[in-house]
């Protein structure tokens, strides 16, 4: 029994040494001291069967070992608990002298709002008025007055959203109707920009949305020429992009301008090598524009023999994509906070 006690003592110490947390420690304790099957408990029970000297001698030895082991257990338990508290104390400590963190931003402007604000600032600084127009338009302002013939493909429901039961109502497919409204209301001379939402029955992809933004520009005055148009477009792009931009002018057909152009700029997302944002062509159609067609001036209530002008229709979502390096137009309406919080 003496040997048995020694063995238990050794094994207990060894087991305790290898323990790293309080739960394991209790397992070890139970192995030796559980009331039913603990190895030490068993020895204490066996003592009762001895008698005389042997019982006395072994009894005191067993008690000594038992107390010793319990002490070892107690101090190990304390160590482990303290280590835990120290860790918690380090993790949770608060430095009350630390300066307050700035509050998390509660909200901010959408990138499209930023771009439109900048554009409007730029144009008001050049003497333009900022106007607004209805998103639900009449067929007359959206097409007819803009010299768009009844047979023009843009009028088809494949391209334009019509309102059920109201054949002459459309969700405006461009901001150009405001050209007519502005001339009718303010006459000439006139300089105005109109920014707003437009709608097209489009299959969406990285560079097409069914709902997007345009900024329409209109200048009506005497002797307006293409150089006035080009100069204004240069101001516009450099003002917003704050970079030197490479542009090219191509002939473009729009029934409400004559001559008409497509002003393209070299893609800033890929520097002209081709990507989703520029339909892999290296160039982005940015500003369709031209000199106002005499019929449009007439529809605006002005005399085309006296008044001339230019107009442009900037795809401002595409401009925002160029400004911020956004590779897919659909991000702008996706409502994804991770995307929006970058602005
Ligand atoms: N309204 C035309 C479009 O949406 C753009 C445009 C505006 C073209 C003004 C020329 C002049 O495609």
Image (spheres, rainbow, N blue to C red):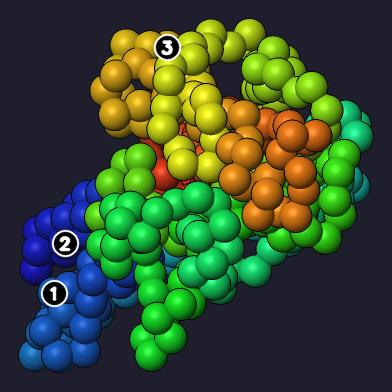
Asked if the residue under mark 3 is in contact with the one under mark 2, i.e. CB atoms within 8 Å, the reply is no
Compare marks 2 and 3 and give the one earlier in the sequence: 2
Q: Position of residue 191 (x, y in %)?
A: 82, 39
Residue 151 is left or right of residue 90, and the answer is left
Q: Residue, x 8% and y 90% (percent of image)?
A: 49
Distance of label 2 from label 3 (alpha carbons): 78 Å
Q: Position of residue 239 (x, y in %)?
A: 74, 23
In-front residue for pair 6/71: 71
- From the image, state whether disc 2 or disc 3 is nearer to you: 3
Distance of label 1 from label 2 (alpha carbons): 7 Å
| Residue placed under numbered mark 3 in the picture | 271
Asked if the residue under mark 2 is in contact with the one under mark 1, i.e. CB atoms within 8 Å, the reply is yes
Q: Residue, x 42% and y 27% (percent of image)?
A: 252
Which quarter of the figure has residue 59?
Answer: bottom left
Can residue 115 be seen in this snapshot? no
Residue 240 is left or right of residue 282, and the answer is right
| Residue placed under numbered mark 1 in the picture | 39
| Residue placed under numbered mark 2 in the picture | 8
* Label 2 element class: helix
């Amino acid at each position: 029994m003496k040997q048995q006690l020694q063995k238990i003592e050794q094994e207990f110490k060894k087991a305790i040494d290898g323990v790293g947390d309080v739960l394991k420690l209790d397992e070890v304790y139970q192995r030796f001291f559980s009331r039913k099957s603990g190895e030490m408990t068993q020895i204490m029970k066996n003592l009762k069967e001895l008698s005389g000297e042997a019982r006395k001698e072994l009894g005191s030895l067993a008690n000594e070992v038992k107390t010793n082991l319990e002490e070892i257990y107690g101090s190990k338990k304390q160590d482990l608990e303290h280590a835990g508290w120290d860790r918690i104390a380090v993790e949770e400590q608060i430095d009350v002298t630390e300066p307050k963190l700035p509050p998390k931003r509660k909200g901010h402007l959408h990138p499209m709002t930023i771009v439109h604000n900048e554009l409007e600032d730029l144009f008001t600084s050049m003497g333009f008025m900022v106007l607004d127009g209805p998103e639900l338009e009449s067929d007359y302002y959206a097409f007819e007055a803009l010299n768009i013939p009844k047979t023009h493909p843009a009028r088809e429901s494949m391209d334009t959203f019509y309102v059920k039961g109201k054949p002459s109502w459309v969700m405006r497919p461009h901001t150009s109707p405001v050209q007519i409204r502005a001339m009718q209301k303010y006459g000439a001379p006139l300089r105005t920009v109109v920014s707003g939402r437009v709608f097209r029955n489009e299959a969406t992809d990285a560079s097409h949305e069914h709902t997007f933004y345009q900024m329409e520009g209109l200048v009506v005055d005497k002797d307006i020429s293409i150089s006035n148009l080009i100069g204004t477009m240069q101001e516009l792009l450099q003002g917003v992009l704050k970079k030197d931009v490479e542009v090219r002018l191509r002939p473009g057909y729009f029934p409400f301008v004559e001559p008409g152009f497509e002003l393209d700029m070299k893609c800033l997302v890929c520097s002209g090598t081709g990507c989703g944002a520029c339909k892999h062509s290296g160039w982005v159609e940015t500003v369709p524009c031209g000199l106002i067609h005499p019929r449009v001036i007439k529809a605006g209530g002005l005399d085309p023999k006296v008044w001339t002008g230019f107009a442009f229709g900037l795809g401002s979502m595409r401009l925002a994509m160029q400004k911020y390096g956004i590779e897919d137009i659909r991000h702008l309406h996706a409502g994804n906070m991770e995307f929006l919080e970058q602005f």
